[in-house]
Amino acid sequence: MPPNSTGPNVLLITTDQQHWNTLGVVNDEIETPNLDRLCEEGTLFDRTYCPNPTCTPTRASIITGKPPSQHGAWALGTKLLENEHTVGEEFQAAGYETALFGKGHLQPTGDSEDYESIESMGPLQNLEFWRDFHGPFYGFEHVELNRNHADEQLVGQHYAIWMEEQGLDNWREYFRKPTGTKDPQYGSWDLPEEYHYNTWIAERTNARLTEYAERNDPFFAWASFPDPHPPYLVPEPWASMYDPDEVTVPTVESGEHEDNPPHFQLTQRDDPDFSEWRETGKFIPGFGSHRREEDELARDIALYYGMTSFTDAYVGRILDRLDELGLTEDTIVVFTTDHGHFFGQHGLTGKGPFHYEDLIRLPFIARYPGEVPAGRRCAALQNLTDLAPTFLSFADVDIPRAMTGVDQSEVWRGEAEGVRDCTVVENRAEPNALHLKTLVTDRYKLTVYRDREYGELFDLEEDPAERHNRWADPAYESVKRDLHRELLFAEMEKEPLPMPRISGA
């Protein structure tokens, strides 16, 4: 397609670590009026999965259209391969403006400066550097970034510059110190809402959208919100929006992990030993005790819901600006998250190498007036690797052959029931000692572990709550054999690439 494309604009809006059922349209305990509106005006896809249940790998898959085993960023702290191509570069070649606002969590390729890693606190808070740096960044011509969740010491980058511009010169007082000398906060955050990163992301996204509208420029933009990822901390009135006594607290059934791999069982102990799986010494999400009292979980859930509703309000500000600028009819809007979250399901909290639906299934909404049916729910299987090729297809831009995600445009339009028979979720928390892959089909879910005899097999039709692992059940032996074969065929369609160096997580 020549420059100055007349194809649709594309606006991707993501949150971080949001459970699939935290939408008002599917859960009457939570209020998300703006996302509910997006569902009414578009299609809610109920069976969308992440390519990996951690931040960096999935975000890298979103921009490359490839799973982590191909693009190289296979875990937290790993980097994309030096020659990796991104969807933003394809859009730029087609005449689109490209921009990213909010959380990137992408390590630079090759040997370039590692300015987004935990080990690089100096660069993160080197505001003079960030004043002059706005891209290019992974195919985005313009970026305004932040790296922190709530009061984390990773605060800095463009977000800190903006806080100072708004008059909050003492912004460091609201966040943990890089030296770790300030304890994490919990619950009600004294940071005023007008200085929160939700406010910043919506404001900066809207400012750029306004510029695009004034110039009549087509765009591919990504608004990337860091919530509701813990720590559980949010300004009022959102911190008190939900009563812990009125939320449903998930439970673990007695004995449900008896047939699961041993690392599941260890999470239910007070002082578990995960040394068998530790290979590099790097941090592994989820390796620790997950035991929580019910009242503690209830408080966490109430805050998590408040963080979600808070983010929804600022998603609404972006949707409203599209309306005001007259861009709604010509813009594909997709809302999703990078992976899910446990807040008590199966006795688990946070995330980790536990591929239950709670962690790998995502909220996913697509709206494109006149193209994507309004008010529809669709159960077709999707993966976030499909975003890049689908966006390019809608824009009538050639999809690079290297992208192994699937073009879902016919499904989004309602012209096909589905284009996937299965999807695969990878998790390489350690190079060899903790390397698992999950195959998801319409009915079943199979998880295999490298060099391990154990695994998981769930019948999602008979056991949607995933309480009964059928891996060793003789009645499911033929099903397991067929699923192994299907996973093998799915993997044969990809060409594994060498593993890159590990950087700061």
Image (tube, helix red, strand yellow):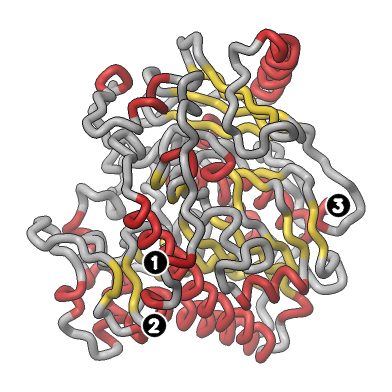
Residue in front for this viewpoint, 172 or 262: 262
Q: Quadrant of the N terminus?
A: bottom right
Q: Looking at the image, is mark 3 or mark 2 earlier in the sequence?
A: 2
Left or right: 336 in relation to 172: right
Q: Quadrant of the C terminus?
A: top left
Question: For mark 1, what is the residue?
Answer: 303
Question: Above or below — where is 88 with respect to 209?
Answer: above
| Residue 227 seen in the figure | no
Question: Above or below — where is 66 with respect to 175?
Answer: above
In the image, residue 13 lies at what x, y percent?
A: 57, 66
Q: CA distance from mark 2 to mark 1?
A: 11 Å
Indicate the secondary structure of the residue bearing disc 3: helix
Q: Amino acid at mark 1?
A: Leu
Indicate the secondary structure of the residue bearing disc 1: helix
Left or right: 318 in relation to 373: left
Q: Residue at x 67, y 15 (%)?
A: 484
**Count of numbered circles in the view:** 3
Determine which of the numbered discs, if any, sits on residue 237 in the image. 2
Quadrant in the rendering for residue 137: bottom left
In the image, residue 367 lies at what x, y percent?
A: 74, 68
Q: CA distance from mark 3 to mark 2?
A: 42 Å
Question: For mark 3, what is the residue?
Answer: 410
Pointer 1: residues within 10 angstroms few (<14), some, or many (20+)?
Answer: many
Q: Amino acid at mark 2?
A: Pro
Question: Above or below — where is 373 with respect to 74?
Answer: below
Q: Residue at x 31, y 59 (%)?
A: 231
